Amino acid sequence: MRTFILLAAILLVASAPGYAQDEIPRFEVAGMFNLLRADIDVLGNQTMYGYGAGAQVNANEYFSLVAEWSAAHGSSGPTEIFQSGTTYEIPLVDTRVQTILAGPRLYRRKRALNMFAHLLVGAGTNKIDYNFGSYTKWQFAFALGGGVDVNVGKRFAIRLAQFDWLPVRSDLQLEGAGSFFNNWRYQAGGVIKF
């Protein structure tokens, strides 16, 4: 009888870490709506709307590797744009900001919700279309931020909020524009867990 109790205790203790690992999904994918406050001074710091997608691999309860893509679109005008030593009067400017970022994400997981913080690094573009032409170039970008997922079930969560400071390097020759556009981004959507 002692042997049976000892064997049962060993199996119970040995299976506990395996049970805890089953609670953490191996992969997650997210689809998100985003609101981007774009730091384009010459266009009046536009508020842009868009969408995004992300995928992550969970190494353990606290650490994940993440890749995200997002795009936001807006329009503004009339305005003046200074480019290549010439000032142009622009009736309408179509703007787009896209990013492709990857990096580590740290988690604090609870039964009802998961809180996270991340630093994602990659590339971004500030595309501007106007009646005299178009400008786009992929350059360095990063996102520093975090958020909260509300668990709806074992396989689904609602991304209630993800806030990011999202600087995108730019060499646009716009009057009043610096070398980085210091954007702010809010995202919300759904997360599917595998």
Image (cartoon, rainbow, N blue to C red):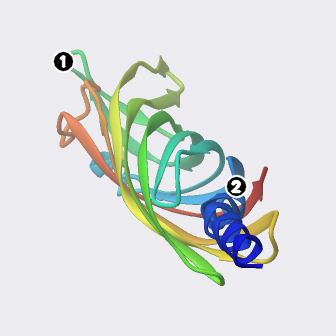
Classify residue 20 by image quadrant: bottom right
Residue contact between numbered discs 2 and 1, judged by CB atoms under 8 Å: no
Given the image, on which type of amino acid does mark 1 rest? Gly
Q: CA distance from mark 2 to mark 1?
A: 54 Å
Residue positioned 79% across, 50% down in the render: 194
SS for dot 2? loop
Residue count near mark 1 (Cα–Cα under 10 Å), binned few <14, some 14–19, many ≥20 = few
> Is residue 5 shown left or right of residue 92?
right
Residue 63 appears at what percent x and percent y?
45, 52
Given the image, on which type of amino acid does mark 2 rest? Pro
Q: Which residue is mark 1?
A: 85
Residue count near mark 2 (Cα–Cα under 10 Å), binned few <14, some 14–19, many ≥20 = some
Q: Nearer the viewer, residue 149 or 106?
A: 106
Residue 71 appears at what percent x and percent y?
59, 41
Which label's residue is closer to the chain start, 2 or 1? 2
> Is residue 66 shown left or right of residue 54?
left
Say which of marks 2 and 1 sits in front.
2
Q: Nearer the viewer, residue 89 or 191?
A: 191
Residue positioned 18% across, 18% down in the render: 85
Residue 164 appears at what percent x and percent y?
40, 59
Residue positioned 58% across, 42% down in the render: 70
Q: Nearer the viewer, residue 77 or 168?
A: 168
Q: Which residue is mark 2?
A: 25
Residue 108 drawn above or below residue 59: below
SS for dot 1? loop
Picture mark count: 2
